[in-house]
Image: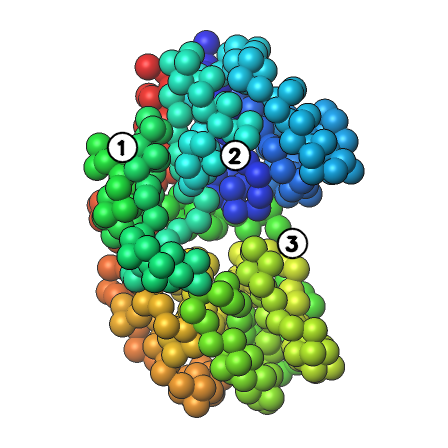
Amino acid sequence: MPPTILFVLNNFNDVDHTAPLVLRLLERDTRIVVLCFSDYDLSSDPRIFYFQKLKGYRVIRLPMLVPLHKSPNLVKKLIRETLFNLFFAVFLLRRYKISGCVYTWCTPHSKGFQTKLFLAARRLNIPNICLPHGQNIFLNFDVNDYLSTLYAKTGRWPDFSPRNEFDLYVVQSKHHRDWNISWGMDPKTIVAWGSMRFSPSWIKYHLNFFDTYSKLMPLQDDTVKVVFFIPHWHYNVNVTATIDLIKEIARMDNVLLAIKGHTRGDVVSASDYAYLAKLKHVDPDVKTPSSSLIAWADLVINFGSSIGLEAIVSRKHVINPSFLHKNKTVFDQSGAVYDALSISEVIKLIDRIRSGDVIPSKLTAINALLSKEVFADRENYDPTTFYTDSLLSLCQN
Protein backbone atom coordinates (compact mmCIF):
# COMPACT_ATOMS: atom_id res chain seq x y z
CA MET A 1 0.00 0.00 0.00
CA PRO A 2 1.42 3.46 -0.91
CA PRO A 3 2.23 5.75 2.02
CA THR A 4 0.09 8.71 3.09
CA ILE A 5 2.07 11.87 3.85
CA LEU A 6 0.66 14.84 5.74
CA PHE A 7 1.74 18.37 4.74
CA VAL A 8 1.13 21.36 7.03
CA LEU A 9 0.60 24.32 4.68
CA ASN A 10 -0.55 27.68 6.05
CA ASN A 11 0.34 30.33 3.46
CA PHE A 12 1.35 31.05 -0.14
CA ASN A 13 5.04 30.41 0.41
CA ASP A 14 4.36 27.00 1.96
CA VAL A 15 2.45 25.96 -1.16
CA ASP A 16 4.92 27.62 -3.51
CA HIS A 17 7.95 25.67 -2.31
CA THR A 18 6.30 22.28 -1.72
CA ALA A 19 4.16 22.10 -4.89
CA PRO A 20 6.83 20.34 -7.02
CA LEU A 21 7.18 17.62 -4.38
CA VAL A 22 3.44 17.18 -3.89
CA LEU A 23 2.87 16.76 -7.62
CA ARG A 24 5.69 14.25 -7.98
CA LEU A 25 4.43 12.25 -4.99
CA LEU A 26 0.91 12.14 -6.45
CA GLU A 27 2.34 10.93 -9.75
CA ARG A 28 3.91 8.08 -7.80
CA ASP A 29 0.56 7.12 -6.22
CA THR A 30 1.39 8.58 -2.81
CA ARG A 31 -1.63 9.84 -0.92
CA ILE A 32 -1.40 13.44 0.33
CA VAL A 33 -3.28 15.03 3.21
CA VAL A 34 -2.89 18.81 3.55
CA LEU A 35 -3.61 20.35 6.94
CA CYS A 36 -4.19 24.12 7.19
CA PHE A 37 -4.49 25.98 10.51
CA SER A 38 -4.59 29.51 9.10
CA ASP A 39 -7.10 31.73 7.29
CA TYR A 40 -5.15 31.37 4.03
CA ASP A 41 -7.57 30.58 1.20
CA LEU A 42 -6.04 27.40 -0.18
CA SER A 43 -8.85 26.99 -2.71
CA SER A 44 -7.79 30.21 -4.46
CA ASP A 45 -4.34 28.79 -5.24
CA PRO A 46 -4.38 27.31 -8.78
CA ARG A 47 -1.92 24.59 -7.80
CA ILE A 48 -4.12 23.42 -4.94
CA PHE A 49 -7.13 23.63 -7.25
CA TYR A 50 -5.35 21.33 -9.71
CA PHE A 51 -4.11 18.90 -7.07
CA GLN A 52 -7.62 18.46 -5.68
CA LYS A 53 -8.66 16.99 -9.01
CA LEU A 54 -6.05 14.25 -8.69
CA LYS A 55 -6.54 10.92 -6.98
CA GLY A 56 -5.20 10.71 -3.45
CA TYR A 57 -5.22 14.42 -2.51
CA ARG A 58 -7.20 15.77 0.45
CA VAL A 59 -7.31 19.14 2.25
CA ILE A 60 -8.36 19.51 5.90
CA ARG A 61 -8.97 23.02 7.22
CA LEU A 62 -9.13 22.96 11.01
CA PRO A 63 -10.42 26.56 11.42
CA MET A 64 -13.52 25.59 9.41
CA LEU A 65 -14.65 23.15 12.12
CA VAL A 66 -15.65 26.13 14.28
CA PRO A 67 -16.12 29.85 13.40
CA LEU A 68 -12.73 30.82 14.84
CA HIS A 69 -12.27 33.84 12.59
CA LYS A 70 -15.36 35.48 14.15
CA SER A 71 -14.49 34.65 17.74
CA PRO A 72 -12.59 36.71 20.35
CA ASN A 73 -8.96 35.70 20.89
CA LEU A 74 -9.70 34.10 24.26
CA VAL A 75 -12.46 31.98 22.71
CA LYS A 76 -10.17 30.97 19.86
CA LYS A 77 -7.50 29.84 22.31
CA LEU A 78 -10.02 27.94 24.43
CA ILE A 79 -11.43 26.12 21.38
CA ARG A 80 -7.97 25.25 20.09
CA GLU A 81 -6.80 23.95 23.45
CA THR A 82 -10.02 22.00 24.04
CA LEU A 83 -10.67 20.49 20.62
CA PHE A 84 -7.31 20.48 18.89
CA ASN A 85 -5.36 18.68 21.60
CA LEU A 86 -2.84 15.84 21.64
CA PHE A 87 -5.58 13.18 21.60
CA PHE A 88 -7.15 14.75 18.52
CA ALA A 89 -3.75 14.84 16.83
CA VAL A 90 -3.21 11.13 17.52
CA PHE A 91 -6.70 10.39 16.20
CA LEU A 92 -6.02 12.42 13.04
CA LEU A 93 -2.76 10.61 12.29
CA ARG A 94 -4.33 7.20 12.86
CA ARG A 95 -7.53 8.06 10.98
CA TYR A 96 -5.63 8.87 7.79
CA LYS A 97 -2.87 6.27 8.31
CA ILE A 98 -0.16 8.94 8.08
CA SER A 99 3.35 7.67 7.32
CA GLY A 100 5.17 11.00 7.58
CA CYS A 101 4.51 14.60 8.66
CA VAL A 102 5.97 17.45 6.61
CA TYR A 103 6.22 20.99 7.96
CA THR A 104 7.89 24.07 6.51
CA TRP A 105 10.72 25.91 8.29
CA CYS A 106 9.70 26.34 11.92
CA THR A 107 10.48 25.17 15.42
CA PRO A 108 8.66 22.01 16.56
CA HIS A 109 6.89 23.90 19.36
CA SER A 110 6.11 27.17 17.59
CA LYS A 111 2.31 26.93 17.24
CA GLY A 112 -0.51 25.41 19.26
CA PHE A 113 -1.89 22.47 17.34
CA GLN A 114 1.24 22.10 15.24
CA THR A 115 3.07 21.31 18.46
CA LYS A 116 0.43 18.71 19.34
CA LEU A 117 0.77 17.20 15.87
CA PHE A 118 4.56 17.01 16.20
CA LEU A 119 4.34 15.30 19.60
CA ALA A 120 1.65 12.88 18.40
CA ALA A 121 3.73 11.89 15.38
CA ARG A 122 6.76 11.29 17.59
CA ARG A 123 4.67 9.18 19.97
CA LEU A 124 3.49 7.06 17.03
CA ASN A 125 7.04 6.79 15.56
CA ILE A 126 5.99 8.79 12.50
CA PRO A 127 8.91 10.85 11.07
CA ASN A 128 8.69 14.64 11.34
CA ILE A 129 10.39 16.37 8.39
CA CYS A 130 10.88 20.12 7.94
CA LEU A 131 11.20 21.46 4.37
CA PRO A 132 11.86 24.95 2.93
CA HIS A 133 9.15 27.57 2.48
CA GLY A 134 11.59 30.06 1.05
CA GLN A 135 15.23 30.36 0.09
CA ASN A 136 17.91 32.14 2.08
CA ILE A 137 19.92 34.28 -0.33
CA PHE A 138 21.61 36.33 2.39
CA LEU A 139 25.25 36.03 3.43
CA ASN A 140 25.10 38.25 6.56
CA PHE A 141 23.25 37.28 9.75
CA ASP A 142 21.77 40.70 10.64
CA VAL A 143 19.41 40.71 7.67
CA ASN A 144 16.48 42.49 9.33
CA ASP A 145 15.44 44.68 12.25
CA TYR A 146 14.56 41.74 14.52
CA LEU A 147 17.92 39.98 14.17
CA SER A 148 19.92 43.21 14.47
CA THR A 149 18.06 44.16 17.65
CA LEU A 150 18.39 40.67 19.11
CA TYR A 151 22.15 40.64 18.64
CA ALA A 152 22.53 44.21 19.91
CA LYS A 153 20.67 43.34 23.13
CA THR A 154 22.01 39.83 23.83
CA GLY A 155 25.21 39.45 21.82
CA ARG A 156 23.76 36.21 20.43
CA TRP A 157 21.96 35.03 17.32
CA PRO A 158 18.78 32.90 17.50
CA ASP A 159 19.03 29.44 19.02
CA PHE A 160 18.09 26.86 16.39
CA SER A 161 18.91 23.83 18.57
CA PRO A 162 15.19 23.02 19.21
CA ARG A 163 14.92 22.27 15.49
CA ASN A 164 17.16 19.25 16.07
CA GLU A 165 14.01 17.50 17.33
CA PHE A 166 12.93 17.05 13.71
CA ASP A 167 13.97 13.75 12.18
CA LEU A 168 15.23 15.76 9.19
CA TYR A 169 15.57 19.49 8.49
CA VAL A 170 16.16 20.49 4.87
CA VAL A 171 17.69 23.63 3.36
CA GLN A 172 18.76 24.25 -0.23
CA SER A 173 22.41 25.28 -0.08
CA LYS A 174 25.64 24.57 1.76
CA HIS A 175 26.00 28.16 2.95
CA HIS A 176 22.52 28.05 4.50
CA ARG A 177 23.28 24.70 6.15
CA ASP A 178 26.50 26.14 7.62
CA TRP A 179 24.52 29.17 8.83
CA ASN A 180 21.99 26.99 10.70
CA ILE A 181 24.72 24.82 12.19
CA SER A 182 26.40 27.95 13.59
CA TRP A 183 23.04 28.76 15.23
CA GLY A 184 22.89 25.41 17.00
CA MET A 185 21.66 22.80 14.55
CA ASP A 186 23.15 19.31 14.56
CA PRO A 187 25.02 18.51 11.30
CA LYS A 188 23.39 15.07 11.42
CA THR A 189 19.88 16.59 11.36
CA ILE A 190 20.23 19.28 8.70
CA VAL A 191 20.87 18.52 5.02
CA ALA A 192 21.21 20.60 1.83
CA TRP A 193 19.12 19.16 -1.01
CA GLY A 194 18.89 22.05 -3.46
CA SER A 195 15.81 23.96 -4.60
CA MET A 196 12.77 22.29 -6.12
CA ARG A 197 11.04 25.67 -6.54
CA PHE A 198 13.79 27.12 -8.73
CA SER A 199 14.79 24.02 -10.66
CA PRO A 200 14.56 24.66 -14.44
CA SER A 201 12.09 21.81 -15.05
CA TRP A 202 9.65 23.11 -12.44
CA ILE A 203 9.89 26.73 -13.57
CA LYS A 204 8.89 25.67 -17.07
CA TYR A 205 6.04 23.46 -15.85
CA HIS A 206 4.93 25.98 -13.23
CA LEU A 207 3.73 28.47 -15.85
CA ASN A 208 0.90 26.10 -16.76
CA PHE A 209 -0.87 27.00 -13.52
CA PHE A 210 -1.10 30.75 -14.17
CA ASP A 211 -2.60 33.15 -16.69
CA THR A 212 -0.23 35.25 -18.76
CA TYR A 213 0.29 38.86 -17.78
CA SER A 214 -1.20 41.24 -20.36
CA LYS A 215 -2.12 44.49 -18.61
CA LEU A 216 0.90 46.33 -20.03
CA MET A 217 1.62 45.54 -23.68
CA PRO A 218 4.31 47.23 -25.81
CA LEU A 219 3.25 49.50 -28.68
CA GLN A 220 6.75 49.87 -30.15
CA ASP A 221 9.49 47.38 -30.99
CA ASP A 222 12.07 49.13 -28.83
CA THR A 223 9.92 49.07 -25.69
CA VAL A 224 11.52 47.23 -22.77
CA LYS A 225 9.30 45.42 -20.27
CA VAL A 226 10.59 45.79 -16.70
CA VAL A 227 9.48 44.03 -13.51
CA PHE A 228 10.56 45.54 -10.20
CA PHE A 229 10.30 43.17 -7.24
CA ILE A 230 9.86 44.98 -3.93
CA PRO A 231 11.73 43.33 -1.01
CA HIS A 232 10.83 43.20 2.67
CA TRP A 233 11.10 46.86 3.65
CA HIS A 234 12.51 45.99 7.09
CA TYR A 235 15.35 43.94 5.61
CA ASN A 236 17.86 46.80 5.87
CA VAL A 237 16.33 48.48 2.81
CA ASN A 238 16.71 52.16 1.96
CA VAL A 239 13.02 52.72 1.23
CA THR A 240 13.42 56.31 0.03
CA ALA A 241 16.15 55.41 -2.48
CA THR A 242 14.12 52.41 -3.69
CA ILE A 243 11.08 54.57 -4.39
CA ASP A 244 13.31 57.17 -6.07
CA LEU A 245 14.65 54.49 -8.41
CA ILE A 246 11.16 53.24 -9.23
CA LYS A 247 10.06 56.77 -10.10
CA GLU A 248 13.15 57.34 -12.28
CA ILE A 249 12.38 54.18 -14.25
CA ALA A 250 8.73 55.23 -14.53
CA ARG A 251 9.84 58.49 -16.19
CA MET A 252 11.78 56.68 -18.94
CA ASP A 253 10.46 56.60 -22.49
CA ASN A 254 9.52 53.26 -24.07
CA VAL A 255 9.59 51.42 -20.77
CA LEU A 256 6.70 49.40 -19.35
CA LEU A 257 7.07 48.99 -15.58
CA ALA A 258 5.27 46.37 -13.48
CA ILE A 259 5.82 46.64 -9.72
CA LYS A 260 5.31 43.48 -7.69
CA GLY A 261 4.89 43.69 -3.91
CA HIS A 262 6.51 41.13 -1.65
CA THR A 263 4.57 37.91 -1.04
CA ARG A 264 4.36 38.81 2.65
CA GLY A 265 2.65 42.12 1.98
CA ASP A 266 5.22 44.88 1.42
CA VAL A 267 4.05 47.36 -1.27
CA VAL A 268 4.52 51.03 -2.17
CA SER A 269 2.85 53.65 0.03
CA ALA A 270 -0.58 55.10 -0.78
CA SER A 271 0.90 58.41 -1.96
CA ASP A 272 3.49 56.73 -4.19
CA TYR A 273 0.80 54.43 -5.55
CA ALA A 274 -1.38 57.43 -6.43
CA TYR A 275 1.50 59.01 -8.35
CA LEU A 276 2.46 55.84 -10.23
CA ALA A 277 -1.13 54.82 -10.97
CA LYS A 278 -1.56 57.95 -13.10
CA LEU A 279 1.09 56.72 -15.54
CA LYS A 280 -0.37 54.54 -18.29
CA HIS A 281 2.84 52.59 -18.76
CA VAL A 282 3.14 51.65 -15.05
CA ASP A 283 1.28 48.97 -13.08
CA PRO A 284 2.06 49.89 -9.45
CA ASP A 285 0.41 46.96 -7.65
CA VAL A 286 0.57 43.80 -9.71
CA LYS A 287 -1.47 40.86 -8.44
CA THR A 288 -0.25 38.51 -11.16
CA PRO A 289 2.01 35.69 -9.87
CA SER A 290 5.72 36.36 -10.11
CA SER A 291 6.31 33.51 -12.57
CA SER A 292 3.94 35.06 -15.13
CA LEU A 293 5.58 38.46 -14.69
CA ILE A 294 9.04 37.04 -15.29
CA ALA A 295 7.81 35.26 -18.42
CA TRP A 296 6.44 38.61 -19.67
CA ALA A 297 9.50 40.69 -18.79
CA ASP A 298 12.62 41.55 -20.74
CA LEU A 299 14.34 42.78 -17.60
CA VAL A 300 13.95 42.00 -13.90
CA ILE A 301 15.13 44.28 -11.09
CA ASN A 302 15.62 42.42 -7.83
CA PHE A 303 17.90 42.80 -4.82
CA GLY A 304 16.35 41.20 -1.75
CA SER A 305 14.36 38.20 -2.90
CA SER A 306 15.10 34.68 -4.06
CA ILE A 307 12.74 35.26 -7.00
CA GLY A 308 15.84 36.53 -8.78
CA LEU A 309 16.85 32.88 -9.16
CA GLU A 310 13.77 32.23 -11.30
CA ALA A 311 14.62 35.21 -13.49
CA ILE A 312 18.16 33.88 -13.94
CA VAL A 313 16.95 30.36 -14.78
CA SER A 314 14.54 31.93 -17.28
CA ARG A 315 17.50 33.70 -18.91
CA LYS A 316 16.15 37.20 -18.34
CA HIS A 317 18.32 40.26 -17.91
CA VAL A 318 18.59 40.80 -14.14
CA ILE A 319 19.78 43.99 -12.47
CA ASN A 320 20.91 43.81 -8.85
CA PRO A 321 20.81 47.36 -7.36
CA SER A 322 22.74 46.36 -4.26
CA PHE A 323 23.10 49.99 -3.13
CA LEU A 324 19.45 49.92 -2.03
CA HIS A 325 20.12 47.76 1.04
CA LYS A 326 22.88 46.95 3.51
CA ASN A 327 22.60 43.16 3.18
CA LYS A 328 24.96 40.93 1.22
CA THR A 329 23.39 38.30 -1.03
CA VAL A 330 24.42 35.43 -3.27
CA PHE A 331 23.76 37.69 -6.27
CA ASP A 332 26.41 40.27 -5.33
CA GLN A 333 29.51 40.01 -7.55
CA SER A 334 28.29 36.60 -8.73
CA GLY A 335 28.66 37.62 -12.36
CA ALA A 336 25.23 36.10 -13.04
CA VAL A 337 23.45 39.48 -12.79
CA TYR A 338 24.25 43.09 -13.60
CA ASP A 339 25.43 44.79 -10.41
CA ALA A 340 24.44 48.45 -10.17
CA LEU A 341 25.81 50.81 -7.53
CA SER A 342 23.63 53.84 -8.21
CA ILE A 343 20.36 54.95 -9.76
CA SER A 344 22.22 56.30 -12.79
CA GLU A 345 23.87 52.90 -13.38
CA VAL A 346 20.46 51.21 -13.37
CA ILE A 347 19.11 53.71 -15.90
CA LYS A 348 22.15 53.22 -18.16
CA LEU A 349 21.72 49.44 -18.09
CA ILE A 350 18.04 49.75 -19.03
CA ASP A 351 19.02 52.09 -21.87
CA ARG A 352 21.54 49.55 -23.16
CA ILE A 353 18.99 46.75 -23.14
CA ARG A 354 16.34 48.97 -24.73
CA SER A 355 18.69 49.99 -27.52
CA GLY A 356 19.53 46.37 -28.33
CA ASP A 357 23.13 46.71 -27.23
CA VAL A 358 24.79 43.30 -27.14
CA ILE A 359 25.67 42.43 -23.54
CA PRO A 360 28.28 39.68 -23.05
CA SER A 361 26.96 36.27 -22.03
CA LYS A 362 27.20 35.34 -18.35
CA LEU A 363 26.57 31.63 -18.86
CA THR A 364 29.54 30.39 -16.85
CA ALA A 365 28.68 32.62 -13.90
CA ILE A 366 25.00 31.69 -14.14
CA ASN A 367 25.78 27.98 -14.06
CA ALA A 368 28.10 28.47 -11.08
CA LEU A 369 25.41 30.31 -9.09
CA LEU A 370 22.67 27.80 -9.93
CA SER A 371 24.99 24.93 -9.04
CA LYS A 372 25.26 26.29 -5.49
CA GLU A 373 21.73 27.60 -4.93
CA VAL A 374 19.54 25.20 -6.94
CA PHE A 375 21.53 21.98 -7.34
CA ALA A 376 23.34 21.89 -3.95
CA ASP A 377 26.73 21.55 -5.68
CA ARG A 378 25.72 18.23 -7.28
CA GLU A 379 26.11 17.25 -10.93
CA ASN A 380 23.36 15.75 -13.11
CA TYR A 381 20.96 16.36 -10.27
CA ASP A 382 17.20 16.84 -10.22
CA PRO A 383 16.20 18.24 -6.79
CA THR A 384 12.54 17.17 -7.01
CA THR A 385 13.45 13.56 -7.78
CA PHE A 386 15.92 13.49 -4.88
CA TYR A 387 13.41 15.03 -2.43
CA THR A 388 10.76 12.53 -3.55
CA ASP A 389 12.96 9.45 -3.30
CA SER A 390 14.39 10.51 0.05
CA LEU A 391 11.02 11.37 1.57
CA LEU A 392 9.41 8.13 0.42
CA SER A 393 12.33 6.13 1.78
CA LEU A 394 12.10 7.86 5.15
CA CYS A 395 8.32 7.47 5.40
CA GLN A 396 8.22 3.86 4.22
CA ASN A 397 10.86 2.86 6.72
Distance in Å between CA atoms under marks 2 and 3 = 35 Å
Q: Which residue is mark 3?
A: 211
Quarter of the rendering occupied by the C terminus? top left
Spatial distance from mark 1 to mark 2, Cα to Cα?
21 Å
Q: Earlier in the sequence, mark 3 or mark 1?
A: 1
For badge 2, the amino acid type reads: Lys
Mark 1 Cα-neighbour bin, 10 Å: few <14, some 14–19, many ≥20: some
Q: Tag 1: residue type?
A: Thr
Would residue 234 appear left or right of 284 to someone viewing this image?
left
Mark 2 near mark 3, Cβ–Cβ under 8 Å? no
Asked if residue 145 is positioned above or below residue 102 in the image, the reply reads below
At 51% from the left and 67% from the top, the residue drawn is 233
Q: Which residue is mark 2?
A: 111
Q: Is residue 194 left or right of residue 324?
A: left
The label number, if any, that marks residue 97 in the structure image = none
350 or 133: which is nearer to us?
A: 133
Mark toward the viewer: 2 or 3: 2
Percent position of residue 361, x then y: 30, 73
Residue 189 is labelled as 1
Give the CA separation, mark 3 to mark 1.
40 Å
- The reply to whether residue 309 is in sight is no
